[in-house]
Amino acid sequence: MGTGGWIGDATTNQRSITVTGAYAARLYGITFRVPAASLTTGLVLYGANGSDFTYEDCYFWCDMIASWASTRYIVVGASDIKSNIRFDGCTFRFNDSRAAISLSTNATFYGCILSSAGTAPSTLFKFSVQDPSNSLFFMDGCDWSHLGSNALVDDVQSMTLHLVLQRCKLGTGYTILAPQTTIPNNAGAHAFLSDCAVGDTHGVVGYYSNMGSLVSDTGTFFTAGAAQQAWKISTTSQASLNAPFLSPWIDIYNTDTATVTPYLECLRNDGTASVRQDNEVWAQFSAKVTSGTVLSTRYSDRMVPAGTPANQAAGAGTGSWTIASSNSPASFKCDSGASLTPAEVGYIRGRICVGAPSITIYVDPQIRT
């Protein structure tokens, strides 16, 4: 139907739309339009309890401008509905920067678009104060670039949210998570981005939580690294030794039983030419060091509880880094804290933990031995 026809109303008549009732439904090519009118409800996509709905190549056209927030939203799901809703190739269009897509059920978005013909919401996704049936949301191949620097996800109210974006186009100066004030700890929102960018930069990653953010930096990186990019990790004021920012795990496949001490190269570049200490930045590793089992053993070079902070080991040197803007850099590394001897073929896993508030470090995302 596109913009040439629609179910709903294009005038000021009070026409709201609610889709509900079925258990397995596929709605294809339909345009749903709600006018700029004084409505008690707007566009509501429920489905029945336990249902599976797919909207394919549908156009959600919302002209609502009203003081009552819910009349400006596309509402997806309802309290305690154990349903699944999938949007394939759908377009969302709004007429008010206060509008949003309100989610309270399991939802996936594949190849969807925020229409530039409408007004960019200040926040695209809001999450209900009522817990959804699932707090894992996937978005693949979506064009949210019309948002610009506005937030993709609003302050999450009452659940842990895990958001995964893959191969999505983002707006200039994009913001993934708005300030998370309701749940400011690690129980709040987490977002993982894979191969998402504003323009023609490929293969970058991003990870966001209340404790900080991790983004690919192609200007500063370990020169010999295969990735030619570094993890730029910036913590918030919430990060601490007991509640650190935790990076995603990375792996190296191991087939050797020789003793190794795996490590990650790191860089400080904030105007102080000293390495970070082991109560500020440390690594965690796990490896299969016991024969006859898949069970892994954990290792870390974090300061021992109630211990005295010590400098992390010197790294390969600042000359081994390509540095976009040098500001008294210091090269250091974080390792397993002790040598280990793999007993089985499998992955050695590692990640970086940053337990100091409001700092920035760079990490080469490659485990070395």
Image (tube, rainbow, N blue to C red):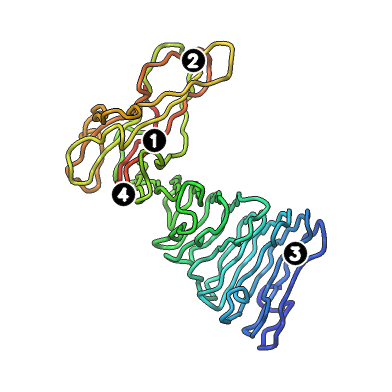
Q: Which mark is residue 352?
A: 1
Upstream in the sequence, badge 1 or badge 4? Answer: 1
Tell which of 180 and 16 is nearer to you. Answer: 180
Upstream in the sequence, badge 2 or badge 4? Answer: 2
Amino acid at circle 1: Ile
Callout 3: 10 Å neighbours few (<14), some, many (20+)?
some
Q: Distance between the residues labelled 3 and 4?
A: 48 Å
- Name the residue carrying label 2: 289
Q: Where residue 4 sits: x, y (%)? A: 68, 79
Label 2 element class:
loop
Q: Which mark is residue 358?
A: 4
Amino acid at circle 2: Val
Label 1 element class:
strand
Amino acid at circle 4: Ser
Label 3 element class:
strand
Amino acid at circle 3: Tyr
Where residue 364 sits, quadrant-wise, is top left
Callout 2: 10 Å neighbours few (<14), some, many (20+)?
many
- Name the residue carrying label 3: 28
Q: Are marks 3 and 2 in contact (CB under 8 Å)?
A: no
Camera-near label (1 vs 3) is 1
Camera-near label (2 vs 4) is 4
Where residue 314 sits, quadrant-wise, is top left
Q: How far apart are marks 3 and 2 (CA)?
A: 54 Å
Camera-near label (1 vs 4) is 4
Upstream in the sequence, badge 1 or badge 3? Answer: 3
Q: In the rendered view of the protein, which quadrant contains the C terminus?
A: top left
Upstream in the sequence, badge 3 or badge 2? Answer: 3
Label 4 element class:
loop
| Residue 137 placement, left or right of 256 | right
